Amino acid sequence: MLYLCATPIGNLEDITLRVLNTLKTVDLIAAEDTRHSQKLLNHYQIHKPLVSYHKHNERDKTEKLLEKLKKGINIALITDAGTPAISDPGKVLISRCYEESVPITSLPGACACITALTLSPNPSTRFCFEGFLPTQAKQKNEVLQSLQEEERCIVLYEAPHRLSKTLNVLFQFLGERKISICKELTKQYEAVQTCLLSEAVYHYEGKQDIKGEYVLIVEGKSKEELRQEQSEKWSKFSIEEHMDYYQNKGIDQKAAMKLIAKDRNRSKKEIYQ
């Protein structure tokens, strides 16, 4: 079986008993960075064979690990921090295991996304997780454009050397929003800064000594903002033109009036008159 084992995101005590017992009993541990993971294993006196499994060798190592699994070898997959396959290697191996009917189980534990959401004062009942934004400008812009109308809280991961640039591009695409900047979660210098996006841009602009790993919790667009923007968009057209727009789509007059009233944030009676 393949065991997907969540490991600490900072504090070494944030690991479950089930994960520890599994790491002690499997035949092999596949780790994103063997040197980094060795520190965790040494801390808990776990002595098992280690192989590297990271984004640069994922395709090649997947087939080798799969062959071992099919021969009956139990393997634990761990990453540098958190849960495998969440902004970390793992999905390629998981997909191949399903294709080859190799059993898999996931052992839950630490996750930076959830930890940050609980610490942020921003509403988090509904959220969308984006992980790291693409590094290519075109792909990044496409993702940010898709988030412009997002009502849910947006969760992003970011490295320190890209933090200032990312805050700038978020402000450029999303406008003024509340943001919680969560730094070094569960570690000694853990800190959560909540402010407006413009304030965050100003605070980090030009800083050269930014350190730590970051989770950004960005407020979604409110329903009132969306209604206002929609109303402003349609105010450029007459009601007759608005009606033509929907009727040309095959929508009957009664249904179109309801849609127009909603678009313009006005009563159905007003539209009818």
Image: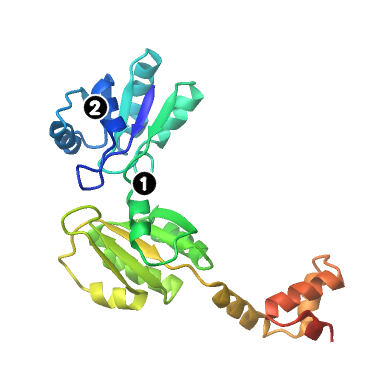
Give the side of residue 63 with respect to residue 7, left or right: right
Residue 217: quarter of image: bottom left
Residue lying farthest front? 17
Give the Cα separation between the discs numbered 1 and 2.
20 Å
Circle number at residue 168: none
**Front one among 243 and 267:** 267
Residue 87: image tag: 1
Circle 1 Cα neighbour tier, 10 Å, few/some/many (<14 / 14–19 / ≥20): few
Percent position of residue 76, x then y: 31, 27
Of residues 127 and 138, the one nearer the viewer is: 127
Q: In which quarter of the image is the C terminus?
A: bottom right
Identify whether 147 is placed above or below 10. below
Tell me which amino acid carries mark 2.
Val
Q: Residue 229: give x, y in percent of width and height.
A: 58, 78
Please rate how many residues cluster around mark 2, counting C-alpha atoms within 10 Å: few if below 14, some from 14 to 19, many from 20: some
Return the mark for residue 51: 2
Question: Seen from this angle, which residue lies furthest top?
Answer: 71
Q: In this view, does 229 lie to the left or right of 52?
A: right
**Is residue 251 something that shows in the picture?**
yes
Of mark 1 and mark 2, the one earlier in the sequence is 2
Image quarter (top left, top right, bottom left or bottom right) of the N terminus: top left
| Residue at point 81%, 83% (across, down) | 269
Q: What's the amino acid at mark 1?
A: Ser
Q: Residue 244 sits in which quadrant?
A: bottom right
